[in-house]
Image: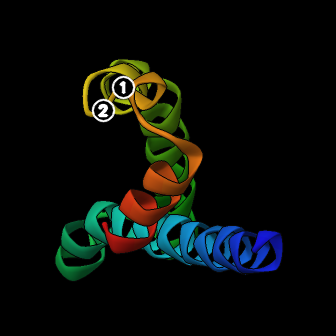
Amino acid sequence: MSTIYLCIVIFLLCLAVFDLFVGVSNDAVNFLQSAIGAKVAKFRTVLIIASCGVVLGAIMSSGMMDIARHGIMSPDHFTFEEVMTLFLHL
């Protein structure tokens, strides 16, 4: 039975890495699209400003991370099997 939980954890880890990659890419594109479309600065300057924006967004998101860690679910009320099932289905 522990092999299936290991597979679930590896699958969830792969999903988390992919989601992080897509989320950061989306943030970078949101920073870039209007500046590049309007041609307000050189491409390199826009990339530097966008990267600073993504880094600042990641640094200042502690409030959202606190909600994600404490506000959604309290895992101490569930068994390990129930938590793994919830994480896999959500």
Q: Residues within 10 Å of mark 2 (few under 14, many from 20)?
A: few
Q: On the image, which quarter does residue 70 sit in?
A: top left
* Rendered residue at 43%/60% (across/down): 87
CA gap between label 2 and label 1 equals 4 Å
Residue 33 in the image: above or below residue 49? below
Picture quarter with the N terminus:
bottom right
Q: Considering depth in this image, is 79 or 16 the residue closer to the camera?
A: 79
> Which residue in the protein does label 2 denote?
73
Is 87 placed left or right of 36 in the picture?
Answer: right
Picture quarter with the C terminus:
bottom left
Is 7 placed left or right of 70 in the picture?
Answer: right
Position in image of residue 50 (x %, y %): 45, 55
Q: On the image, which quarter does residue 62 sit in?
A: top left
- The tally of labels here is 2
Position in image of residue 58 (x %, y %): 50, 37
Is 72 placed left or right of 32 in the picture?
Answer: left
- Mark 1 lies on a secondary structure that is loop
Q: In the image, what residue type sits under mark 2? A: Met
> Which residue in the protein does label 1 denote?
74
- Mark 2 lies on a secondary structure that is loop
* Rendered residue at 37%/59% (across/down): 86
Query: Answer yes or no: do the residues labelled 2 and 1 have beta carbons within 8 Å?
Result: yes
Q: Residues within 10 Å of mark 1 (few under 14, many from 20)?
A: few
Q: Considering depth in this image, is 53 or 60 the residue closer to the camera?
A: 60
Position in image of residue 84 (x %, y %): 52, 59
> Going by the picture, which residue comes out furthest to the front?
1
